Image: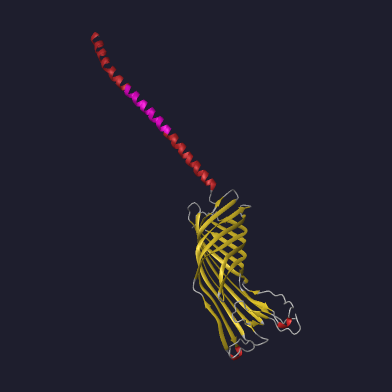
């Protein structure tokens, strides 16, 4: 028994160091695990804080300029628009007849009051068509729009014999574009305008507040236009015999004056659309755009010819065709109206209809020749715009 106890004591002495080493190792592993878990917990808290901060920033950004659409589900992200426009055009600077009452027998008697006759205004129907694409990039879209319209006007004026003094002869009309001082008894003028315009735009529609949206847009614009005015001045009461013209023109001689203007321009376009929502479907809208055109006046001609129909004679007094003229011109646009829109087929499609009044001013846009000088005239439009939009 004593020997067995001695052997157990020896084994205990051998196991004690081994047990101590094992215990120390387990304590070290536990301490390392605790430190690692603490570091991991601190990292997770930092990562969570960073993610939460980023999410807060993204949420705050979305609250500043959230996309206002329109956005459809399961669609091709394409939209088309079609507009019927009914505009009235105004072209400044197209006076074609000036009453010039005069008679030497009047002495100091005052002449009759008179007013110049002008042309260059007409109502005309036209259209706009556009094709656009939603880029699916934070609400940005690109679209191209084409505008066409045509205008024509005819005007006539006759000047009756004056009653200012006894025996007074008929007062006459002067042509402001005339170099022959031809005085006519009546005048007829015709004016035409062909208007074409293309816009290529990039824009984004977003909410400024709960009920107010804004869509700033920038892009390129181009236009080509053609104007011409033809005026005829007829002498019916007395013949016209300018010095040195043989044979002299007969009765019913007339002067024909032709002004032609052709031009095109390319440039930049900048502006914005606004909409204030009264309900989910109805809103008041407006837009404001500015255009700058680098313009080439390819044709600026003025031709005047005296015709004597009874003896089939004609004499050209003016045949003027100027070289190309280049200039940068400004055009401003504004529109105000009401809009109705809706989604259907589980938001797979969107439809909108607008009714508005549009105004444009092309500052000093036209250039017409007047003998040795050129004069500019602004071109303006105003009228109704009925627009339909379909997103799919």
Residue 75 x/y as whole percent: 50, 56
Q: Is residue 201 visible?
A: no
Residue 57 x/y as whole percent: 50, 42
Q: Is residue 232 visible?
A: yes
Question: Residue shown at 56%/73% (left/top)?
Answer: 373
In reply to whether residue 104 is colored magenta, the answer given is no
Question: Residue shown at 54%/68% (left/top)?
Answer: 196
Pick the residue in front: 173 or 17.
Answer: 173
Residue 22 x/y as whole percent: 31, 22
Number of on-image labels: 0
Instruction: Report which quarter residue 33 is drawn in.
Output: top left
* Left or right placement of residue 6 versus residue 90 in this view: left
Instruction: Report which quarter residue 230 is drawn in.
Output: bottom right
Residue 245 x/y as whole percent: 58, 88
Pick the residue in front: 110 or 35.
Answer: 110
In reply to whether residue 30 is colored magenta, the answer given is yes
Looking at the image, is 240 positioned above or below residue 372? Answer: below
Most frequent secondary structure within the magenta stretch:
helix
**The residue positioned farthest toward the right in the image shown:** 166
Pick the residue in front: 351 or 16.
Answer: 351
Q: Which residues are magenta?
A: 24-42
Looking at the image, is 163 positioned above or below residue 297? Answer: below
Looking at the image, is 144 positioned above or below residue 308? Answer: above
């Amino acid at each position: 028994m004593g020997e067995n106890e001695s052997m157990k004591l020896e084994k205990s002495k051998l196991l004690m160091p081994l047990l101590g080493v094992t215990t120390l190792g387990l304590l070290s592993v536990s301490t390392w695990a605790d430190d690692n878990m603490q570091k991991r917990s601190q990292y997770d808290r930092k990562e969570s804080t960073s993610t939460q901060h980023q999410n807060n920033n993204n949420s705050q950004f979305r609250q500043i300029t959230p996309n206002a659409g329109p956005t459809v589900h399961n669609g091709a992200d394409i939209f088309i628009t079609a507009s019927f426009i009914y505009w009235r055009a105004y072209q400044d600077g197209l006076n074609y007849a000036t009453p010039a009452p005069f008679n030497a027998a009047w002495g100091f008697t005052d002449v009759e009051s008179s007013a110049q006759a002008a042309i260059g205004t007409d109502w005309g129907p036209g259209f706009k068509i556009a094709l656009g694409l939603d880029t699916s990039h934070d609400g940005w879209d690109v679209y191209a729009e084409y505008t066409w319209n045509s205008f024509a006007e005819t005007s006539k004026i006759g000047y009756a014999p004056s009653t200012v003094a006894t025996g007074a002869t008929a007062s006459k009309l002067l042509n402001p574009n005339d170099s022959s001082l031809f005085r006519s008894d009546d005048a007829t003028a015709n004016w035409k305008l062909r208007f074409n315009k293309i816009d290529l735009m990039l824009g984004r529609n977003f909410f400024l507040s709960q009920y107010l949206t804004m869509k700033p847009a920038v892009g390129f614009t181009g236009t080509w236009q053609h104007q011409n005015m033809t005026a005829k001045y007829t002498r019916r009461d007395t013949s016209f015999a300018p010095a040195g013209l043989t044979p002299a023109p007969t009765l019913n001689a007339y002067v024909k004056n032709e002004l032609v203007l052709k031009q095109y321009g390319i440039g930049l376009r900048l502006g914005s659309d606004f909409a204030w929502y009264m309900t989910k479907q109805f809103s008041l809208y407006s837009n404001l755009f500015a255009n700058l055109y680098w313009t080439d006046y390819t044709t600026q001609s003025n031709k005047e010819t005296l015709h004597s129909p009874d003896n089939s004679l004609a004499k050209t007094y003016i045949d003027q065709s100027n070289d190309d003229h280049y200039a940068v011109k400004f055009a401003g646009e504004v529109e105000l109206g009401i809009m109705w829109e809706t989604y259907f087929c589980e938001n797979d499609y969107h439809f909108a209809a607008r009714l508005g009044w549009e105004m444009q001013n092309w500052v000093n846009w036209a250039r017409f020749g007047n003998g040795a000088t050129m004069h500019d005239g602004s071109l303006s439009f105003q009228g109704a715009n009925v627009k339909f939009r379909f997103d799919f």
